[in-house]
Amino acid sequence: MSVFTEETRARAREIIARYPADRSRSALLPLLHLVQSEEGYVSPAGVEFCAEVLGLNKAQVGAVATFYTMYKRRPTGDYLVSVCTNTMCNVLGGQDVYDTLAEHLGVGHDETTTDGKITLEHAECLAACDYGPVMTVNYDFFDGVDPQTALGVVEELRSGGRPTPTRGARLCTLKEMSVQLAGFADEREGAVADGGPGEPTLRGLRLAQQHGISVPGFDPNTPIRSKAEADKAAAEAKARAEAAKPAPAPEPATPKAATGSTAPDVKAPDDKSPEVRAAETRQPDAKTAVPDSPGTKVPVDGAPPAPRDARAAEAEGVATNVPAGDGKPAGDDAAAQERSLKEAEANK
């Protein structure tokens, strides 16, 4: 089992101290980034470490670590290269970029090169559609890439260089990035960079200015008030509105309407279907039969569908939705699903 350094343990205590004493489990997310910064992934030892310092069990920690894709569950390279292959980037050539890198590096999705430098992965969306196709290296953006520029980036990384992202500071390793995600500043020279939005992001604003489009009543020269000033103005406006309200007039008593029946309401059990509950709790009147009167037919809950019907429906859905052959990671294994279904039936 890996033994974490004293520096990591001191940082863990600092992270936990950020939260109220009775809410220490809220520190789990940054703690997972912290252990990943030391080992390059969240190992079983890392899960045990987080459980120990937070007083949780390993199952609770593992459930969180497996939910978020930023926590890697096996050794990851120094540089995580993520290529967006979602709709917009794919249309613009994202899949070609991914396929070219996969062939050149000799790895597939979530696999690492033999030199331990690069881990390649599909990314479903990198939230930069206006710069597509995009890829990130340890979550820093390279915009408008094509297969050749992407190859140039990974080759520079493998040779020891650190290419400059399109937006943001110079690159750092995944371990260095995990320290930042745990909530600690990056002290490296050049670790912080200034930058404004690019032209694709500003295109909508430019068109609005060109055609004189703005929100009705909007004055760009209006000063932005502080939160305290805004809260004070809102409180004053509310007080004026309350003072201007007329006193409410007393409401006349309304006689209870006759139902046309003396039958009591029937309280429906929680385990009945909505149809049964609606029929049994309906307010009786002259046109609605009382639930227990002669000739009234109340619906009853039906039997659940048989497992074979569920399998037939699933098979029909699979047959009409053929998986895309774009080389992306496959979904659940049909054979595994069938085994699980048989085991469930055998245990009834």
Image (cartoon, rainbow, N blue to C red):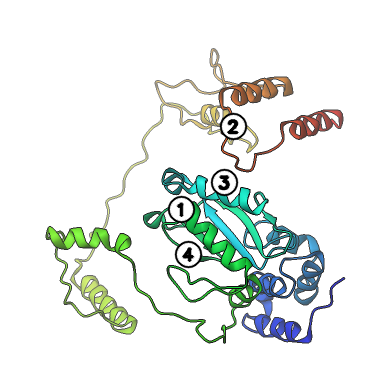
Q: Which residue is mark 4?
A: 141
Label 2–label 4 contact, CB within 8 A: no
Q: Is residue 179 visible?
A: yes
Whether residue 103 is situated above or below residue 341 in the rendered picture = below
N-terminal-most mark, 3 or 1: 3
Q: Nearer the viewer, residue 60 or 2?
A: 2
Label 2–label 3 contact, CB within 8 A: no
Q: Nearer the viewer, residue 250 or 327?
A: 327
Mark 3 vs mark 1, CA separation in Å = 11 Å
N-terminal-most mark, 2 or 3: 3
Whether residue 97 is situated above or below residue 217 in the rendered picture = above
Q: Amino acid at mark 3?
A: Asp
Q: Is residue 303 visible?
A: no
Q: Which circle marks residue 323 in the picture?
A: 2
* SS label for mark 3: helix
- The crowding category of the residue bearing disc 1, from other C-alpha atoms within 10 Å (few below 14, some 14 to 19, many at least 20), is many
Whether residue 333 is situated above or below residue 6 in the rendered picture = above
Q: Residue at x 70, y 70 (%)?
A: 36
Label 3–label 1 contact, CB within 8 A: no
Q: Residue at x 65, y 39 (%)?
A: 331
Estimate the x, y position of residue 313 in percent, counting from the top left.
Answer: 63, 22
Q: Which circle marks residue 146 in the picture?
A: 1
Q: Amino acid at mark 4?
A: Phe
Mark 2 vs mark 3, CA separation in Å = 18 Å
Q: Which residue is mark 3?
A: 99
Estimate the x, y position of residue 196 in percent, counting from the top left.
Answer: 34, 73
Label 4–label 1 contact, CB within 8 A: no
Farthest top residue in view: 295
Q: Nearer the viewer, residue 21 or 308?
A: 308
N-terminal-most mark, 4 or 1: 4
